[in-house]
Amino acid sequence: DWREAGGLNCAPDFTACFSGTDAPTMPAFRQVGEKQLPQEIIFMAWSPKRDLIALANKVGEVLLHRLANFQRVWSLPPNESTGKEVSALAWRPDGKILAFGLADTKKVILCDVEKPESLHSFSVSVPLTFMYWMEVTEENSVLTSFYNAEDESSLLLPKLPALPKNYSTTAKIFSEEKSDEIMKLMGDVRLNALVLGGIDGFIEIYAYGMYKIATITGVTGSCLALCLSSDLKSLSVVTEVDKGPDTDSEITYFQMDTSLLSTYLPEVTRMARKFTHISTLLQYIKLSLTCMCEAWEEILLQMDSRLTKFVQEKNTTTSVQDEFMELLLWGKASIELQALLMNQLTVKGLKKLGQSMESSYSSIQKLVISHLQSGSEALLYHLSELKGMALWKQKYESLGLDASGIEEAVTAVGSFILKANELLQVIDSSMKNFKAFFRWLYVAMLRMSEDPVPPELNKVTIILRALIYLFIY
């Protein structure tokens, strides 16, 4: 008997012991905690770095708990846009990003460990059944040189400014730290790979969890488990093939040779790192544009809230613009417009409205100057470096890096920067028109209330009238 020769024996009470009179006795496994949960848990994954465990339940909710006392850190409820059927979980090796797959929408979501917010998402062709996130430990002189030089962009490019937190509608989505949270997608410079497995033999590998570097073919069945070696030379896959209702499923183990990835590891790492930079910057620019839209909607909302009741109650067929033009040309306001200005808006309310709208205009202007332009310039920098890599055909042509496609992207970014500059001119012109209109309306309301008008505001020049006209129409 092998146990008599000193082998390991597992006793019925789960006590591990060695045979022999002097062998130490290990304590039995014991339960240290228990927690009742409202929904059935279908997946769980321990954080590789912190005292955290990620859970996914049957209703599609993703939860994060502390292991020590099982205190909930956050929960991410299911929704229609992302999906409701969680089918896989995986942690990034540094423990800062949690990835999960959704079977109903065929999406992969990368979520921040600090907050229940999606930082990045992408779609796949089939529902996922398993995912595995690993770090590449292969070392060579080329990679070491690249890792050491990675910080050059941070030295050459200014740090992207944090996105504003001015509007209640965006406060939950765009916090002041949001831009820093997006940068968490970058992670460590050392290459890591997210391996996805799904039905019908689907297997794909994503560098840094974002850039697809490989599609594996030749596998059949639905993926039950997979593991990629740390040197990228071998992939192990376990699949299940359904043989029909009257036959048991067939479990198959595949050993795949992925040494091609290892051969091109320095080139793949450089390309993947550039892609994560570019993808992160695109996310940042998208959020900046959304903030600008929110600021503009705030301006329109403030104007509409003041004028909606006036439009509903007025008995004349003239438009709001015509009412203001009549006041501008003849100095006389209709009874309805006068009631709106003096009873609903008031002089004090006009000042407050003007300050609020000016603040919104300034926010849009700041977003263009400090956010859109900074993000676009950084994007142009990384695209230019990528173009240089594409021109090194000996190294990168076999990986599909095309210089002509990158040139088109560079041209598109240049056009975007020009449009941003045009937008600045439009904003500047709109602010002049807006200030002229509110100055004139303030004087008109003072005259209606028979209050004294300051001498510096009393004169309306032809240029000022033109600006007021442009704002009205």
Image (cartoon, rainbow, N blue to C red):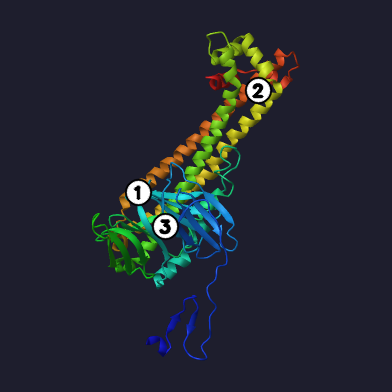
Q: Is residue 65 above or below residue 337?
A: below
Q: Which residue is mark 2?
A: 439
Q: Which tag, 2 or 1, sits closer to the chain's start?
A: 1
Q: What residue lies at 58% left-to-right and 33% top-to-bottom?
A: 361
Q: Tag on residue 271?
A: none
Mark with earlier residue (2, 3): 3
Amino acid under disc 3: Gly
Q: Residues within 10 Å of mark 1 (few under 14, many from 20)?
A: some
Residue 106 on image: x %, y %: 37, 48
Say if 453 sits above or below 224 in the image: above
Q: Is residue 180 left or right of residue 341?
A: left
Q: Which residue is mark 1?
A: 407
Q: Position of residue 364 (x, y in %)?
A: 55, 37
Query: Which residue, given by chain and number where applicable, does mark 3 sit on?
Result: 209
Total tally of numbered discs in the picture: 3
Give the Cα distance between marks 2 and 3. Answer: 54 Å
Would residue 259 be found to the left or right of residue 275 on screen? left
